[in-house]
Image: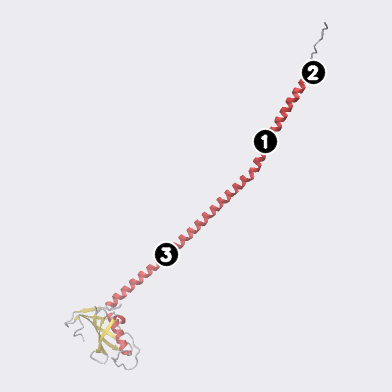
Amino acid sequence: MTNEKKPYPSRLDKKNRSNSLLNWMIGVVFALIVITGAFIFLDNGDESAQEPESVTIETDTEQQTSGEETNLEEDAEADEKAEEEADAKAEEEAKAKEEADKAAEEKAEEEKAAEEGKVTGGTITREDSSDPVVEETVINTSWEPVGTKQSGKHVSVYDKGSVDWNEKINAISYATGLSQDNMYVMMIKNGGGPQKSIGVVQSKDKSQKYRVHLEFKDGEGWKPVKMDVLKTLEGAY
């Protein structure tokens, strides 16, 4: 019987096997490194691609904010201007009202003075009358001639529409305070002399009735000298 010896690996074979294993492991590690690097590169690429979009969004937001601030400033300026215009208008209206009130007050005083038949600088005497148609007799020392367009020797005229007639009407209106468009002329007659006349008038609502005694002053016109406040027109002329 032949004795065969089994072959045993030599040290060289063991070393080769160790080197192969090591190389394989190194290859695996390198492959892992490559794969990991690839993932990192791809992630960085995605972030780089998305970054401009973020910038754009931020820019749009800034523009929107800037636009809103501009609109707010414009609105504030518009409100301020509107408020100034409203204040100016209110001031103008207040001034106009004040002037209107003042004018109305002055007119009321003038009308009151006209009703009483008085002007500044004189005295008014009111006397009871024995005449049954007369409520009182008024004499105002401030009455003056109303002026005249006539020249030369004066002749009293009783024709309606004549210069002398119209000047008599002016004097009666002046004494009574009745405007000519609110006055009925009932009668104008001679007052007892060539330069004297008497006129009887009443307001159109018939609430005021007067008999006015006039006297003509050369170069100055007709002057009221006495006025009777009448109770009635019956028997007044």
Residue 28 appears in the figure = yes
Dot 1 corresponds to which residue?
A: 40
Q: Nearer the viewer, residue 109 or 71?
A: 71
Q: Looking at the image, do the residues carrying marks 3 and 2 touch, with CB atoms under 8 Å apart?
A: no
Q: Is residue 87 left or right of residue 3?
A: left
At mark 1, the secondary structure is helix
1 vs 3, front mark: 1
Q: x, y percentage for residue 44?
A: 66, 39
Question: Does label 3 or label 2 sit earlier along the sequence?
Answer: 2
Number of residues whose C-alpha sits closer than 10 Å to that of mark 2, classed few (under 14), some (14–19) or many (20 or more): few
Placement of the N terminus among the 4 image quadrants: top right
Q: Residue furthest top?
A: 1
Number of residues whose C-alpha sits closer than 10 Å to that of mark 1, classed few (under 14), some (14–19) or many (20 or more): few
Question: Image height check: is 75 above or below 185?
Answer: above
At mark 3, the secondary structure is helix
At mark 2, the secondary structure is helix
Q: Nearer the viewer, residue 218 or 137?
A: 137
Q: x, y percentage for residue 219?
A: 33, 89
Q: Nearer the viewer, residue 108 or 76?
A: 76
Q: x, y percentage for residue 134?
A: 19, 81
Residue pictured at 26% horizontal, 86% vertical: 214
Measure the alpha-carbon separation of dots 3 and 2.
116 Å
Dot 3 corresponds to which residue?
A: 91
Q: Which mark is residue 13?
A: 2
Identity, as a three-letter code, of the amino acid under mark 3: Glu
Measure the alpha-carbon separation of dots 1 and 3.
76 Å
Question: Image height check: is 192 above or below 85?
Answer: below
Q: Which mark is residue 207?
A: none
3 vs 2, front mark: 2
Q: Looking at the image, do the residues carrying marks 1 and 2 touch, with CB atoms under 8 Å apart?
A: no
